[in-house]
Amino acid sequence: MKQIKAQIPKIFKPLLTVKKRIKLCYGGRAGGKSYAYADSLLFLGRMKKLFIVCLREIQSSIKDSVYKLLSDRISYYGLTDYKVFDTKIENKMTGTVFTFKGLRDQDPQKIKSLEGADIAWIEEAQTITKKSWDILEPTIRKPDSEIWITMNRQEENDPIWVALATQPDNKTWIQKVNYTDNPFCPQEMIDLAQRCLEKTPQDYAHIWLGEPMTQGNSKLISSILVQKALNMPLFDTTGPLIIGLDIARFGDDETVFCFRRGRLCIRFETYRKKDTVEVANITTHMIKTFHPERIFLDIGGQGAGVYDILKDRGFRRIVRGVYFGEKAISSDRYVNRRAEMWDHVRLWLSETASVSLPKDDTYILGDLTCVNKKYDKLGRLQLEEKDSIKRRLGRSPDRGDALALTFAEPVFETQSEDISSFRLDDLFAQPHRQTGSAW
């Protein structure tokens, strides 16, 4: 019988020898990532009984999984102790079981049933949404369990990459592997890589060296601009306090308050599953506590009710309703207000004077860089629909919308209105601030 370990490049040695909670390997084509992971897991499954879950974001059938790869490697090595079934693979000697699932096809309860897994292998992890990862990570909770990840990076803000690789901890092993690191890489693949390098160097960097795709002209806001603002701490800035309020439209969306003063986006504060009156009460508390010069809120859906309540409470000067789909102020340049406000965010990030975003917010990079742009027949800027973004991102870019709302209209400092006559403490309870929201 052939030895499995002999076929695993030395660069993958930590898969078998180092104990880490997360083992993430990324890189370009023909690096041997999937083969090394499959061989390593087959080897470990012969040593002791393991429950190994092989996962993808979408798995229409088992043919979409690594089932075929594992089956082929079993045949290649002649591993007669493994038996391949229609939906699983078992080792007859140790009792190890490989099972295969798609994350998006599972409801949260079914995903939670995987908590007994010893190893979860996520293949094509660049397609995993933030929502899927947030459910899966705490589910793999068995003592000494591990999450193995293979990915070819797609974009700078791939959710798995942002969650694990931007600031890795000491429980995470990360290794980049390209075809140049694979001693078993076929000469045909090496020749293909060389031709790609000669013809299209940018494609070569993405396909063969594992670099994220350049965003080109399709993205409204580049990750470079956002990263610069995330790494630019500002502690003092001028300008009136403006709050953008994006109100949740659906059950899994968030109601987000964005606090901005001039060049400084101070923080985001988020709430879930709040009704119209609760959001109005929270907003009232914001006005009383922080005295913003203006609050711009989205009046689509539930927002219209919140806006009416706040006007009735005497905040007509402070609160302004904005409908994303309405006519732009500069209608010769923008299809609607949404495109106009988002483009003002882009211009703000592009200013010569430094601007700052809250670095501890894990969502804002994805929110601001996920929006694609195009132009209508009149040459006006138009943005990708929110439903399309939500399908790609796995969530709505609520923080991006809240920040965009702070650019709804020019705002200048004026004397704050006297709200001392309102007996707010008698009328409204102190709103509960959601645990974990940005502050």
Image (spheres, grey):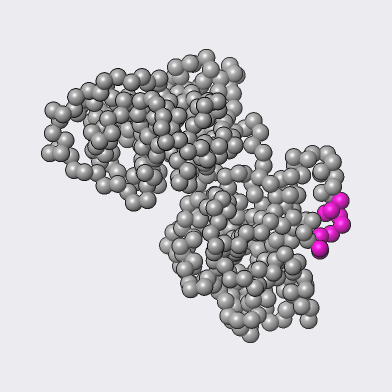
Q: Quadrant of residue 14?
A: bottom right
Is residue 29 left or right of 290 when viewed as pictured? Answer: right
Total labels drawn: 0
Farthest residue, direction front: 236
Tell me which residue sits at (55%, 37%) in the image: 228
Q: Position of residue 353 (x, y in %)?
A: 52, 26
Q: State yes or no: residue 185 in magenta.
A: yes
The quarter holding residue 376 reads top right
Q: In this rendering, is residue 29 above or below 205?
A: below
Residue 313 is drawn in which quadrant? top left
What residue is at 69 percent from the left and 69 percent from the top? Answer: 13
Is residue 276 among the parts visible in the rendering?
A: no
Q: Which residues are magenta?
A: 183-191
Identify which residue, 425 or 94, lies in the foreground. Answer: 425
Q: Is residue 371 above or below residue 316?
A: below
Residue 195 on image: x %, y %:
85, 45
The reply, left or right, for residue 337 in relation to residue 41 is left
Residue 402 within the segment the image draws in magenta: no
Above or below, comparing residue 312 to residue 378 in the picture: below
Q: Quadrant of the C terminus?
A: top left
Residue 118 x/y as whole percent: 54, 72
* Quadrant position of the N terminus in the picture: bottom right
The answer to whether one can see residue 385 in this image is yes
What's the residue at 34%, 51% (across, down)? 435
For the point 74% across and 61% down, the residue is 32
Q: In terms of depth relative to the viewer, which is nearer, 250 or 397?
A: 397
